[in-house]
Image (cartoon, rainbow, N blue to C red):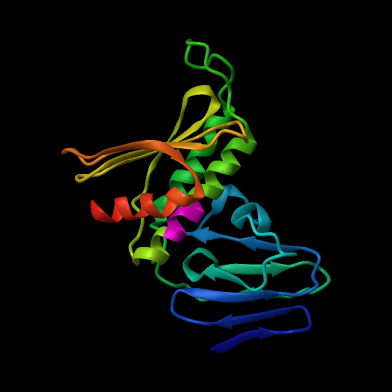
Amino acid sequence: MKMINNNSQNLIYECDKDFYLFSAGSASKILVSINIQKKDFIAVSSIDLNSIFSIDRSSVNPIFFPKNAISTLITDSEIGEEIKFPSISNKVFEPEFFDEITESKRFLELEDNWDDLGSKSYKLETWVKMKDFLLKFAQDFYSRSSLILPVPYINPGKASAFDLHWKTKSFELLLRIPEEHNVPISFYGDNYENIKIRGTLEKSKLDSLIEWIRLYF
C-alpha cells in the first residue's frame, strides 16, 4: 500500500488498482472536484463531499473512492494544499454515466403542468436522492460482479418521481425514485422471455436485483 499524502489531518493511500483510501481527520470541510473528460460533474468546480457520496464522516472512516471518478481533492484553508491524482481509465463507471446524471438536472427546470396533463415539478431533494442511489447502485454492482453497470436513461416520472430506465438486448429494467421519503423505490424488470419481476426495493432485495441483472447482462 503506497502512501500518497501524509499530514496531521489526512492520510491518502493508493491501496489497489481501482480505489484510493482516504482516512479523514479533523478537517472541518473537504471539497472534491470531479472531472470526467474535462467536464465538471454537475457543472461546478467543487462540491461538498457528502453531497456526492452521502458519507457521514463522523461515522465512516476510512473512506474508499474510485480512482476513475476523482481527479482532484481540495481541502479547506485549514489544510491549504491540493492533491492531484493521476488519470486512471474508467472501470467503475462509463463516462456517459456521469453525462446522463448531469443532463438529468435539466428536469428541475420543469414547472407544474409541464406536460399539459397536470404533472408537478421536480424537487432538487428528489434529484439528489436519485443521484446518490444510482452512484451507490453502480458501485455495489461493480463490487459484486466486476462488471460496469450499463448507463440508464434518467427520465421524469409520475408524481414528481425520477425514473431510471435500462433497456438492453437481454433485459429491460425500470426503477422509480419517489419524491416522498416514506415511499420505497419501485421496480419492474423483464427478460423478454418468461421472467418478469416487480416490487419495491428494500435493502434485502438489492442483492437479488443485482443478481438478476448479472443473470441477463
The segment highlighted magenta reads 135-140
| Residue 216: percent from left, percent from top | 23, 51
Front residue (pair 66, 32): 66
The verdict on residue 172 being magenta is no
Image-based side of 74 in relation to 106, left or right: right
Q: Quadrant of the C terminus?
A: bottom left
Q: Is residue 1 left or right of residue 27?
A: left
Taking the image as drawn, is residue 188 in sight? Answer: no
Q: Please name the residue shown 51% across and 44% down the image.
A: 102
Farthest residue, direction bottom: 2
Number of callouts = 0
Question: In the orientation shown, which residue stands out farthest toward the right?
Answer: 78
Q: Quadrant of residue 64?
A: bottom right
Quarter occupied by residue 50: bottom right
In the depicted structure, whether residue 104 falls above or below residue 61: above
- Judged left or right of residue 120, residue 157 is left
Residue 2 can be seen, yes or no: yes
**Residue 33 rendering spot, x and y as whole percentages:** 61, 61
Camera-side residue: 113 or 35? 113
Say which of 154 and 203 sits in front: 203
Main SS of the magenta part reads helix
Q: Residue at x 58, y 48 (%)?
A: 43
Relative height, residue 162 to residue 121 (above, below): below
Relative to residue 172, is residue 25 depicted above or below? Answer: below
Q: Position of residue 85 (x, y in %)?
A: 55, 75
Q: Quick one: which residue is furthest to the front in this view? A: 204
Relative side of 172 to 210, left or right: left
Q: Where on the picture, by quarter, is residue 71?
A: bottom right
Query: Where residue 134 sits: x, y (%)?
Result: 48, 49
Q: Residue at x 75, y 84 (%)?
A: 7
